Amino acid sequence: MATTACFIIVSRNDIPIYEAEVGSTAKREDAAQLHQFILHAALDIVQDLAWTTSAMFLKAIDRFNDLVVSVYVTAGHTRFMLLHDSRNDDGIKSFFQEVHELYIKILLNPLYLPGSRITSSHFDTKVRGLARKYL
Amino acid sequence: MAPVGPRTGDAIFSNVERVNAELFTLTYGAIVRQLLTDLEEVEEVNKQLDQMGYNIGIRLIDEFLAKSNVSRCIDFKETAETIAKVGFKMFLGVTASVTNWDADGTCCSIVLEDNPLVDFVELPDTCQGLYYCNILSGVIRGALEMVSMKTEVTWVRDMLRGDDAFELQVKLLKQVPEEYPYKDDE
């Protein structure tokens, strides 16, 4: 289990639609904002990198002190962004792939509007469970 | 006379044309989504779905009778069994069970363990009052009305609301006697 990790999903229109702090350290008050800031700053790099490769998983594209940003870009250009301090690449990849499956299920729900905030508590529980398992 | 109709819809189901389940589910989802956008009120959507189901039911019953070879049902119990075992199998590909009969045999529950309409669906907070599958109750009401049974169909359990199955309560209000539509002297 990583000591710090922050996971967000950004829609194709650059709007964050899901956020979760999945670290196990005691939370500092400004940590959440800092994590958001780092992740959002990395969006530009994602934009440039996404078109240079056919792989969906872009690992360690940006770093801030000891925190690393890894990103998974879906075919519809929704970006899953993970800020982490562990070096467990395989785990992160599996985490992204399973979240992708969950995300597709959310997307197939006719009552969910693509690009809107993901409010499903089921999704939230599942993502946190996956984070515990893989990160 | 012993009923000669089929006891299950398996044989008919294997012969009818089918569409991809996801296409079907998503098409129905798109309809509900559009109704929610157009009508705004969840209550109105429930009503509209029921009305659409009714319109389907009054047509579907003819197709059902033509293809399934069921003979006249002796009583309401047999009718309910036929709907659950043959009807649902034929058109939805699932089998339902009939339970919870009341004492005088006019009210029962049709329980669906599996419902292809609700794959992927999760009700958001804004649509809590929605009966997502309300079209089904309309279909049953419409179909039974065409074979001269006035019924009232309501949802008792709904998996989307956290129950463990779908349960439709079918209540026979009255049996309309068949009558010749014209008087002799007309």
Image (tube, coloured by chain):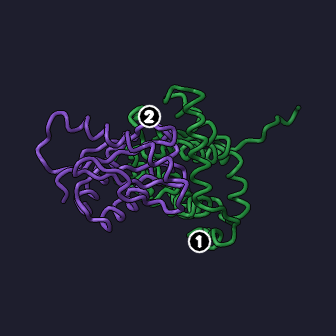
Chain colours: A purple, B green
**One can see residue B153 in this view:** no
Cα distance, mark 2 to mark 1?
35 Å
Q: Which quarter shows the N terminus of chain A?
A: bottom left
Residue shown at the point (54%, 55%) measured from the top left: A75
> Measured along the vertical axis of the image, is residue A100 above or below residue B69?
above
**In this view of the protein, which residue sits in the foreground, B26 or A98?**
A98
User: Looking at numbered disc 2 in the image, what kind of residue is underneath it?
Assistant: Cys
- Residue corresponding to mark 2: B127
Residue shown at the point (40%, 53%) measured from the top left: A71
Residue B6: % across, % down: 61, 70
Label 2 Cα crowd, 10 Å radius (few <14 / some 14-19 / many 20+): some
Residue shown at the point (11%, 44%) measured from the top left: A26
**In this view of the protein, which residue sits in the foreground, B21 or A116?**
A116
Residue B38: % across, % down: 60, 28
- The dot on residue B10 is 1
Q: In the image, are marks 2 and 1 on the same chain?
A: yes
Residue B28: % across, % down: 59, 47
Q: Which quarter shows the C terminus of chain A?
A: bottom left
Q: Tag 2, which secondary structure? A: helix
Q: Is residue A97 left or right of residue B49?
A: left
User: Looking at numbered disc 1 in the image, what kind of residue is underneath it?
Assistant: Asp
